[in-house]
Amino acid sequence: MRLINLAGRAHLQTDNGAIDIAQVSDGKFGPDPQSLFADWKAFAAWGEDADTSSATPFDVQALGPPVPAPRQVFAIGLNYSEHALEAGFAVPETLPPVFTKFASALTGPEGELVLSGESVDWEVELVAVIGTEASQVKAEDALSYVAGVTVGQDFSDRAVQMIGPAPQFSMGKSFPGYGPTGPALVTLDEVGDLSSLRLQCWVDGELVQDGIAGQMINSLPLLVERLSAICTLHPGDLIFTGTPAGVGMGRTPARYLTAGEVVRTEISGLGSMTHRCVSL
Ligand code: ZN
């Protein structure tokens, strides 16, 4: 099942377009995309058998974030060893760095990225969406608490992120529009093997990141175990699972986004997002 947000209304994506969930379910589910997480299991069961014969084509420019208003957004740092090295940090052996992208930073998969400064960087990431409340969950059971996954970008203003005396990861990564997700929330049955997902990012057509989810130091199940050991994870919460190598900060010399550049973010089987950079 592929769930999309079209102009603020929850839709199921099909081969022929999309259906409006509130209309087809006679108001049982939706239209608010976030409301589907009130009872994700019931919605998912309905979605598997929904009548999609009325699907019509849609304009990708109308796509919003599939999960527009999560209660919590977790983001993981240093979850790929090559990226940890390029960032100049040791590879974490237990709990990786955890920060948030404040929900006001979330946006959809198409549109403009308003640059906050001269050191704005890209980070393609697999984003997981929680489907069932999770507390003290073990890794072997963790995927049953996950509604699905989507493509994310963890845009980062490195100057703000590194402001002393202690780093400000959450602030540097939470300017408006710095947390795009989409185009669809894809359920795990449709994804298949999570570890084989390929994460790629292009800047103006140049491939700058190219990684495999299986290279994560903490796999998604292990992240759910480690986060839920401390925090209760709520249905509709997001987890940005970290970025592979190839960010601008790790280059010599460093390279950052400039107005007019186009960032394309893609994960195999999940889809892609396109953002055009503009100056403040
Ligand atoms: Zn990141």
Image (cartoon, rainbow, N blue to C red):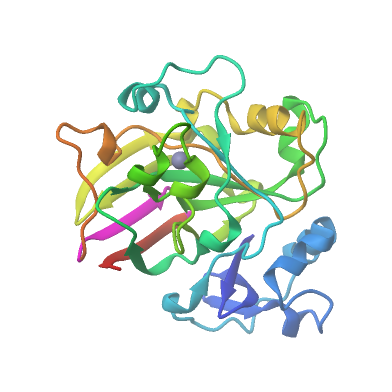
Q: Residue at x 82, y 30 (%)?
A: 136
Q: Which stretch appears magenta?
A: 260-270
Decide: is 171 above or below 7: above
* Front residue (pair 104, 49): 104
The percent coordinates of residue 173 (x first, y second) are 46, 49
**Residue 273 in view:** yes
Q: Residue furthest left?
A: 253
* Front residue (pair 93, 40): 93
Decide: is 32 above or below 266: below
Q: Residue at x 83, y 62 (%)?
A: 38
Residue 266 is a magenta residue: yes
Q: Specify the quadrant that holds the N terminus.
A: bottom right
The percent coordinates of residue 221 (x first, y second) are 66, 31
The percent coordinates of residue 95 (x first, y second) are 61, 22
- Answer with left or right where residue 168 lies relative to residue 98: left
- Answer with left or right where residue 234 lies relative to residue 64: right
**Residue 45 in view:** no
Decide: is 32 above or below 1: below
Q: Specify the quadrant that holds the C terminus.
A: bottom left
- Answer with left or right where residue 60 lies relative to residue 221: left
Q: Residue at x 59, y 64 (%)?
A: 66
* Front residue (pair 267, 99): 99
Residue 100 is a magenta residue: no
